[in-house]
Image (cartoon, rainbow, N blue to C red):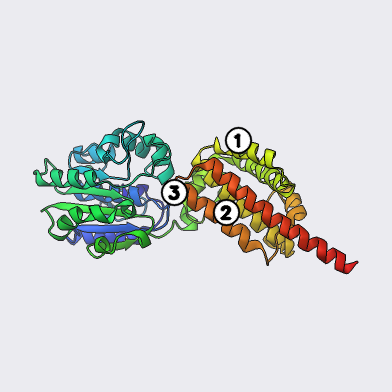
């Protein structure tokens, strides 16, 4: 429901007043960065337009600051909340698992996994968590030709009970050009009482032919105030944890949850980073191999989290290098490490570290084989550290 969305009241009010005015676009595209609740927002919208007992704040209902929302209790609402409404259809990236030939699957094959993941995470999960839930290993998930055909088949039938039939397409950027033509026709000549809600985390990758047929809605990041009060609730009122995580998560709910749930992992990852830098400094290939094996066992989502923390470690070291002590946030142990490592992170070479870790994050999202990714990244780190070591030695030699 709209009242479960964190913050973004202005956007939600705009959506509500459009519905009240009878303006229900046939195809809308919600876009914005990961972790900003686009999918729960799409579902809240679908539920709202179909709710037969909408609630209004003017009638004395407490709707978390909103003027109107779905009731959450009528038969339609209950089916939408469980994701089992017969007029609610989903398309999401998928692929075959096990021994089946790649790309012979369709979204419907994974509807149980989809519902379970949605309901267990409140609808906020990453692409990697989704591919893990399907169990497709390192196969890339895409929106397949069979998905497009299946949805056309569904739409050719009469809707069974809802006022509006809703098709939610998650991560439209995973739709290939050759399959898009099937969808374009229905986007151009809509079926009556049918609404497409399309979601993208990377609008630059969405086919222009799709974009031009959509009403675009930018979903802003979660505001800091709203995030903080959500986190206060999650942490049982721990002010300092809520403030720290709000600052670190930049409005990304996925990241905020990881930071809250994985406080130990976070401490542990700092140690991992320090150990990793030491073995790369020595170019100890055997130790690097062990490290890559150990880290790849963590799974892609944790590994992505690790590389995000690596970026923070580099930032901490750079700030220490530049003596910007007032800006440095971290524990004593971390500060000690940064102070030792800060000789190796300078304004001249910091871009190399950023490029390296950002590339690793990008490749994890592309389902690369993680152990070789860590090996390759380690060897690049060896190179950067050796170069820097030489420069420092030369500088010391010149001074002497
Ligand atoms: Zn209802």
Q: Which label number is shown at residue 357?
A: 2
N-terminal of the pair, mark 2 or mark 1, is 1
* Residue neighbourhood size for the residue with mark 1, other residues' Cα within 10 Å, grouped as few (<14), some (14–19), many (≥20): few
Q: Is mark 1 within 8 Å of ligand 1?
A: no
Q: Is mark 3 within 8 Å of ligand 1?
A: no
Q: Residue furthest right?
A: 400
* Residue neighbourhood size for the residue with mark 2, other residues' Cα within 10 Å, grouped as few (<14), some (14–19), many (≥20): many
Mark 2 lies on a secondary structure that is: helix
Pinpoint residue 59: horizontal percent, then vertical percent.
25, 51
N-terminal of the pair, mark 1 or mark 3, is 1
Q: Is residue 257 left or right of residue 263?
A: left
Which residue bears the numbered disc 1? 294
Mark 3 lies on a secondary structure that is: loop
Q: Is any atom of residue 246 visible in this view? A: no
* Residue neighbourhood size for the residue with mark 3, other residues' Cα within 10 Å, grouped as few (<14), some (14–19), many (≥20): some
Q: Which label number is shown at residue 57?
A: none
N-terminal of the pair, mark 2 or mark 3, is 2
Who's the residue at 79% across and 62% down the image? 392
Q: Is residue 299 left or right of residue 27?
A: right
């Amino acid at each position: 429901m709209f009242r479960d969305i964190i913050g973004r009241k202005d956007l939600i009010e705009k959506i509500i007043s459009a519905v009240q005015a009878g303006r229900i676009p046939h195809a809308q595209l919600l876009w914005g960065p990961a972790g900003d609740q686009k999918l729960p927002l799409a579902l809240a919208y679908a539920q709202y337009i179909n709710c037969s007992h909408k609630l209004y704040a003017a009638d004395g209902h407490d709707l978390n600051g909103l003027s109107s929302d779905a009731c959450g209790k009528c038969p339609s609402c209950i089916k939408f909340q469980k994701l089992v409404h017969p007029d609610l259809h989903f398309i999401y990236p998928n692929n075959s698992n096990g021994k089946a030939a790649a790309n012979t699957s369709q979204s419907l094959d994974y509807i149980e996994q989809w519902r379970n993941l949605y309901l267990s995470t409140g609808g906020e999960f990453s692409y990697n968590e989704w591919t893990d839930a399907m169990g497709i290993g390192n196969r890339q998930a895409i929106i397949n030709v069979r998905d497009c055909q299946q949805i056309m088949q569904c739409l050719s039938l009469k809707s069974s009970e809802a006022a509006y039939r809703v098709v939610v397409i998650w991560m439209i950027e995973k739709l290939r050009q050759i399959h898009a033509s099937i969808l374009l026709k229905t986007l151009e000549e809509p079926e009556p009482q049918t609404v497409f809600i399309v979601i993208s985390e990377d609008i630059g990758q969405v086919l222009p032919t799709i974009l031009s047929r959509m009403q675009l809605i930018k979903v802003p990041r979660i505001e800091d105030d709203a995030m903080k009060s959500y986190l206060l609730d999650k942490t049982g009122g721990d002010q300092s944890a809520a403030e720290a995580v709000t600052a670190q998560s930049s409005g990304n709910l996925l990241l905020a949850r990881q930071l809250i749930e994985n406080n130990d992992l976070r401490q542990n990852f700092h140690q991992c980073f320090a150990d990793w830098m030491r073995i790369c400094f020595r170019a100890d290939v055997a130790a690097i191999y062990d490290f890559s094996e150990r880290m790849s066992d963590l799974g892609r989502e944790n590994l992505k989290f690790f590389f995000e923390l690596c970026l923070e470690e580099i930032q901490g070291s750079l700030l220490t290098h530049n003596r910007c002590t007032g800006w440095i946030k971290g524990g004593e142990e971390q500060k000690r490490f940064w102070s030792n490592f800060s000789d190796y992170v300078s304004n001249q070479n910091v871009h190399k570290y950023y490029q390296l870790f950002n590339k690793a994050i990008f490749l994890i999202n592309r389902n690369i084989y993680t152990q070789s990714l860590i090996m390759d990244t380690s060897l690049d780190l060896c190179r950067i550290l050796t170069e820097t070591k030489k420069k420092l030695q030369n500088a010391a030699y010149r001074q002497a």
